[in-house]
Amino acid sequence: MFGIKDAAGILHGPAGCFISHLQANFFSEEPSLDFYSTNLSHGDIVQGAEPRLEGIVRRLKSRNSNFLFFIISPHIQLIKEDTEGLIKKMKLKNYLIVQPPLGEELNAGKEKVMLALVDVMKSPIKKKAKSVNLLGPTYNTFNWKADVFELKRMLGNIGVSVNCVLTAGARMEDIKKAPEACLNICVYPYDCGVETAKAMQGKFKIPYLASQVAIGFENTSLWLRQIADFFRLDARRYIRQEIKDGFNLVKSALVLSFASEITVALSFENHNTYAYGISRYLKEELGMQICTISTGSRLVRSKLKDICDSILICPGIDEKKKIYEAKGPMMVLGNFYDLKLVSDIGLPNFLYADIPAHKYIFTENSPFMGYLGAKNILQLILNQVLGKLFLETKGKIEEPIAQQGVPWDVQAEKALMKISEMMPYFIRDLALKRLQKKAQDLAKERNAKVSLEVMKDVAYKYAPIKSRPGLNQIFQTAAENKKD
Amino acid sequence: MDKLPLRSYEHACSTLQALVSLARVEGVIPILYASQSCVYPLQVATMSCRSSRLLTLASKMNKEEIIFGGEDSLKNQILNTYREYRPRVIVVINTCISQLIGENVSGMLNQMQQEINDCKLTFCNTGFNLPQGMSAGNDFAWASLIEVIDAPGHLEEGSIGLVGRSSSDAEKIVSLEIFLKEAGIPFFSFPASHFEEMSRISYAETLCPVSVVPYLTCVKANARFGSATQYFEIPAGIEGTGSFLKKIALLVESKRLLSLIAKKEKEILPLWRKLKKEYARLMPNILFFFGSGNEFSLAKILAELGAHVHVMTGINNEFSIREKEILKQKYKVTFMDTCPSTLGDMIEELKPDAVFTDMHTQSEAASKHIPVFYNMLYAGEYGYDYALDFARNFLYFLKNPVYKKWEKILKNWS
């Protein structure tokens, strides 16, 4: 509801819940919804919260809110207060009561609100030709604004207009008129919107599409074609141009040859559609190696088994930490917790792609969906990976290149060669040189030769991330060989 | 008149190769004697190849200096460099323009050497004088260093000099050094990361090049230090590495080395044979389209595995002629004599499953929906372990369906 523009919402619950919801959902922009709270205390819950609700509704009347949402907190649901009866008694005109499902996850809450909104929709007098509703983008959906911007741009290019976005950025008037669209499109079908689309199909006879995710060049094209076919439009010319542009980028010097050596971990517990679409795109169209995926959906897991053998359902932090350490991904896409893990473990590259995303600004400029989204993901990942690796493999601008006359043990040299085999080819030359130099520096500092121990100390600190998971094995084998 | 290709497919200017190689040796500072239009692209292009000392020193010739000579600026830059960094060697890389106007760099350096005693001054001519062989830039750069290494007057008996291609070989020939070290054979490697270590090549009795590139280097070293050169073959692949090391073992009569080779081959041959079966099933057709010298060695690894290999190379010296013969006779590699107008033409003709080429030709090759490999990323191709690792990874890249996927996407939507 936070994304609805001309309505007000009342959280019927404790003051702490109100602040928590605002803070947890605080992105770069304040919610569009005018949000208030009954600020219940312990006493209110015990003795009855009705007076508080009556009081706030009375005070809000003077503000002439176009529409009122009542969000009933779990506390009120638990004491089974007859909020509905009370609100009816107040004889309000435009309102909706939402009781978020207790104990269920984020997407269930989104669906519950959208389903509730179906009740305020009006049967259309006239349909808007070649128009669609976009179901699924909500205020707390990561990157919704950019995705919607791009989807609208593409649809506009094939002659289709967007009637209403359910719910982010919509006005109540748009929502009421949503049934005027000819087609509903579930933008994030692995998260929410499908139940609402079915309800609207039942009530208003609006067909819906939920089988395609517009992420990656091919899937975006299939998504557009489905819509074009529905409206009997010819989108071929537009799609052809976008595909051509996309291939020009993909085939360029810095993409395919490097991408196939890049390992990516995806963490999308709150964005199953991204988990599905982005992993397919990175693997199938860019050739990257998906080393692990976290998702909240078993359906998504079953659909991605062909591209990744390590798919976790809502893993805990410890489990995720273990898998990041074991796989050493060169890029992690995820939420705030992933960012922290990446920083703790010392992984070099991270990209925000899911909530929670504290202190993160997003606008319409950085889509992950559509053609621009495909280009954007590619650009964000490769620029970061290549840039950081460039730095990771270099000493200081004026640093000496090598130490003179530091002898090496054969076992240390063998270990160095083995480590080099685990480095991506595109940095192997310099990464190897850097390790060699660091080993020489440390040996000189210890006034010793470069031994296996020196090499080990250096490798755990300076070997490129991708090669670190294999270091234990290398040094274990080397130690055994040394004994022999 | 010979038909020239419509584009230049060589890896880069030989000046760039000389600059990269010299700039990665501690104790050596190269100075570009060139105009700004030459310095800027060389600085940018070498950034990614340098580990540290990222900035290029240059005497940036202006228009006036191109007409009247830039000797004063160059002298100043040499003195500045000497005072600031105190290197063991300063190498002036004499580029096209200064060669064109006939600057007497040699004479000038001789004169300056009288004033600077504890730093050797030398130079190499690169650029348009080496149009068909950018890797000759390495060779000329190394040869210029050989010129300033003091001859010790005696050679270490039974010692081997491993002579490599570019500065990146300094780390990579460790895979060969390990065998000599374990066998107790005295050896000296050239290049190395430090000039002092490189200088020890003067003690090597027999130089054994590991690449086709350092021909002039070996010739100059033989003349200066009294050593001899034995070109065996490039130690790449299992057979190539084995053959190279066995010939050294025979040369210095080392049973220990022979037993180390046998032990290593016993360890890796089962894995190698397994990979060979996989390659035999796929029978990939590979095109090497120029390179820094590693087009010979990578071709050898893949041909040994059973791939059909075609090579277009710009390197033409005594070593490359001998290596070509080995590759043709023993590995059935096909060398292309004439460069086509474009790489696209050659791909159309040969229908390869993968192309090894350079970054600037990526787009042209990728348009044909076949995997493209930047040859410069696959340097250090010596020894048993590299061959095994490369064979495994190449198979993975070759099977990467992303190229076919794009072919399908373009076909479906065009």
Image (cartoon, coloured by chain):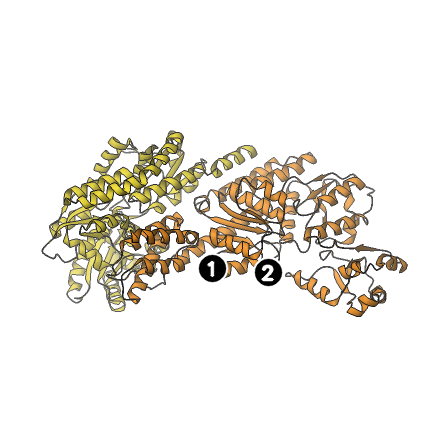
Chain colours: A orange, B yellow
Q: Is residue B266 left or right of residue A255?
A: left
Q: Position of residue A251 (x, y in %)?
A: 47, 42
Q: Is the residue marked by circle 1 packed among few (<14), some (14-19), or many (20+) residues within 10 Å?
A: few
Q: Quadrant of residue A198?
A: top right
For residue A262, above or below residue A336? above
Residue receiving disc 2: A360
Marker disc for residue A148: none
Q: Dot 1 falls on which chain?
A: A
Whether residues under marks 2 and 1 lie with C-beta atoms below 8 angstroms apart, the answer is no
Q: Is residue A348 left or right of residue B137?
A: right
- Give whichever of discs 2 and 1 has the lower sequence position: 1
**Furthest residue toward left:** B153
Q: Nearer the viewer, residue B249 or B235?
A: B249
Looking at the rendered structure, the kind of residue marked 2 is Tyr
Kindly state the secondary structure of the residue where label 1 is placed.
loop
Marker disc for residue A346: 1
Q: How many marks?
A: 2
Q: Nearer the viewer, residue B176 or A393?
A: B176
Q: Dot 2 falls on which chain?
A: A
Q: Quadrant of residue A393?
A: bottom left
Q: Nearer the viewer, residue A128 or A169?
A: A169
Q: Position of residue B252 (x, y in %)?
A: 14, 45
Q: Nearer the viewer, residue B357 or B322?
A: B322
Q: Is the residue marked by circle 2 packed among few (<14), some (14-19), or many (20+) residues within 10 Å?
A: few
